[in-house]
Image: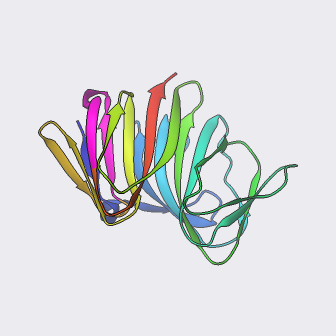
C-alpha cells in the first residue's frame, strides 16, 4: 500500500567510513542492516573530501540534490563532476571512488540494490504541468528533489509531497498515477524489481 515517508521523520546515522551522515529513507527487508539489505534508499550530507564506503555485491545510483558539486575519481578513470540536476550516476558498490567537494558540502540521494536479488532504475523527471506515470514494478519511490510540492493521485488515493518527502509504492500500487506539480518540480523516480 502506498505511503508517504516524511523527510522530518527520517532516522540519521553516521557513514561506515565516518565521512558524513545519512538519512535513511527506506530499507528492505524492514529490519535489515547495512550488511544484509536487499535494497536501500537514502540521502546523505557529504561534509568533506574522502573515499566512498565500499559495498561489495551492491549496485548503486547517485544523484546530487544540493551544493556546488562533486568531483568523483574512479580508480584509473578521468575525474568526472556530478552536479545538481545531472542525471543520476550508476556504479558498482565495490568500485574505489574518491570524492572531492567542489565548493562546500553537498546533499545526495542514493539507491542501492543487492546484485542478483534486486535491480533498480533511477531517473530524474523535471516538469511543471500535470503528467501521468505508469508504475508496474515490484517496488518504487517518488522523491521530491526540488520544487514546492507535487500531488500524486491514483483513483481515490491522493498524497502531497513536500521537499525531500517520498512516496513509497509496492506492487499493489501498480497502474497509472497522475502527478500534479505546484510550479516546476524535480522528481527522482526509483523503480525496483526482483532479479
Is residue 83 shown left or right of residue 179? Answer: right
From this view, report whether residue 135 is shown above or below residue 108: above
The residue located at (56%, 33%) in the rendering is: 114
Q: Say above or below: 7 vs 189.
A: below
- Please, which residue is most extreme toward the top here? 195
The magenta-colored residue range is: 165-179
Give the residue displayed 46% in from the left and 47% down from the top: 41
Picture quarter with the N terminus: top left
Identify the residue at the far bottom of this view.
104
The answer, for residue 80, to whether it is visible in the render is yes
Q: Does the magenta stretch include residue 171?
A: yes
Q: Which residue is drawn at 80% across and 58% down?
A: 79
Give the answer, above or below, for where 11 lies relative to 152. Answer: below
Q: Position of residue 107 (x, y in %)?
A: 53, 66
x and y percent of residue 168 in the render? Answer: 32, 43
Residue 105, horizontal then vertical, whole percent: 60, 74
Q: Is residue 64 magenta?
A: no
Identify which residue, 123 or 195, lies in the foreground: 123
Most common SS among magenta residues: strand
- Identify which residue, 147 or 30, lies in the foreground: 147
Front-lying residue, 158 or 51: 158
Which quadrant of the figure has residue 155?
Answer: top left
Amino acid at each position: 500500500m502506498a505511503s508517504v515517508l516524511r523527510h522530518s521523520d527520517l532516522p540519521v546515522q553516521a557513514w561506515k567510513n565516518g565521512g558524513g551522515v545519512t538519512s535513511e529513507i527506506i530499507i528492505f527487508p524492514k529490519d535489515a542492516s547495512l550488511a544484509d539489505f536487499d535494497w536501500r534508499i537514502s540521502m546523505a550530507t557529504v561534509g568533506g573530501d574522502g573515499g566512498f564506503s565500499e559495498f561489495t555485491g551492491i549496485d548503486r545510483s547517485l544523484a546530487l540534490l544540493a551544493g556546488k558539486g562533486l568531483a568523483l575519481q574512479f580508480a584509473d578513470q578521468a575525474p568526472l563532476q556530478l552536479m545538481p540536476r545531472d542525471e543520476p550516476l550508476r556504479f558498482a558498490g565495490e568500485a574505489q571512488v574518491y570524492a572531492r567537494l567542489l565548493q562546500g558540502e553537498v546533499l545526495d540521494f542514493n539507491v542501492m540494490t543487492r546484485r542478483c536479488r534486486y535491480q533498480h532504475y533511477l531517473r530524474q523527471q523535471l516538469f511543471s504541468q500535470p503528467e501521468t506515470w505508469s508504475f508496474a514494478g515490484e517496488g518504487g519511490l517518488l522523491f521530491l528533489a526540488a520544487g514546492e510540492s507535487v500531488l500524486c493521485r491514483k483513483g481515490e488515493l491522493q498524497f502531497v509531497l513536500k521537499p525531500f518527502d517520498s512516496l513509497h509504492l509496492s506492487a499493489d500500487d501498480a497502474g497509472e498515477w497522475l502527478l500534479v506539480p505546484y510550479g516546476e518540480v524535480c522528481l527522482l523516480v526509483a523503480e525496483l524489481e526482483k532479479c
